[in-house]
Image (spheres, rainbow, N blue to C red):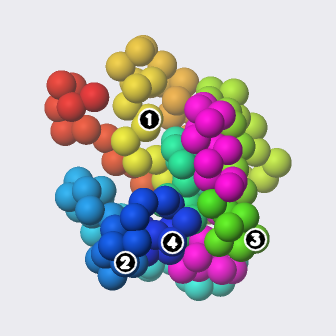
Amino acid sequence: MLGRSTALVDGGARPAQFLRRAWGVFDLHARQKWGVLWPLLAEFSMKPLRLLDAGCAAGMWSLEIAKRRPLWDVTGIDMAARQVARAEEMRRALNVPNAHFAASNFLDFSPDAPFDVVLSVMSAHYLLYDGWGARLFCRFRDWLRPGGRLLLVVPRRRREV
């Protein structure tokens, strides 16, 4: 369940922390997305790999994945510096050495090495609607190693943006 790893450092009252620890996040849409994506991620080897969480916000997905797969190197990027600072704060509190965060927008981010997996949950569509779709998918290609996988979740309808 998404959110179990971050439940104790994500604030909130003790009853909410207990429930999040037992059942994960309360948001149905987040739970549905995790229910689809985690089985795809779980298919990858437990061996070392590099994963980019593009549009990580406060790092909940990145940290959950990094906690479950300690040999994976998980990098989260988001253009909101406050969100990245929160993600880094939770990373330190949870002692997750295999997670890293950077404040960057998608078009400017240049990693030092390609990723095996690029994950973007409800983030990339903003650039698509602003007319940057072709450039965005070029960035995805540049970030991935040959044979790497892109896992992309976008809204079903424009009005959901």
Q: Which residues are magenta?
A: 66-89
x and y percentages locating residue 46 in the rendered image: 59, 85
Residue 143 horizontal/vertical position (percent): 65, 45
Q: Earlier in the sequence, mark 4 or mark 3?
A: 4
On whether residue 154 falls in the magenta region, the answer is: no
Lower sequence index among marks 3 and 2: 2
- For label 2, the crowd category at 10 Å Cα-Cα, with few meaning under 14, some 14 to 19 and many 20 or more, is some
**Nearest to viewer (mark 3 / mark 2):** 2
How far is the residue under mark 4 from the one under mark 1? Answer: 29 Å
Q: Which corner quadrant holds the C terminus?
A: top left
When the figure is inspected, residue 146 is found, relative to residue 79, above or below; the finding is: below
The image shows residue 23 at horizontal and vertical percentages of: 29, 77
Q: Which residue has dot 3 on it?
A: 97
Q: CA distance from mark 4 to mark 3?
A: 18 Å
Does residue 81 show up magenta in the picture?
yes
> Badge 1 is on which residue?
124
Q: Residue at x 37, y 42 (%)?
A: 122
- The residue where tag 4 is placed is 8
Which of marks 2 and 1 precedes in the sequence? 2
Amino acid of disc 2: Phe
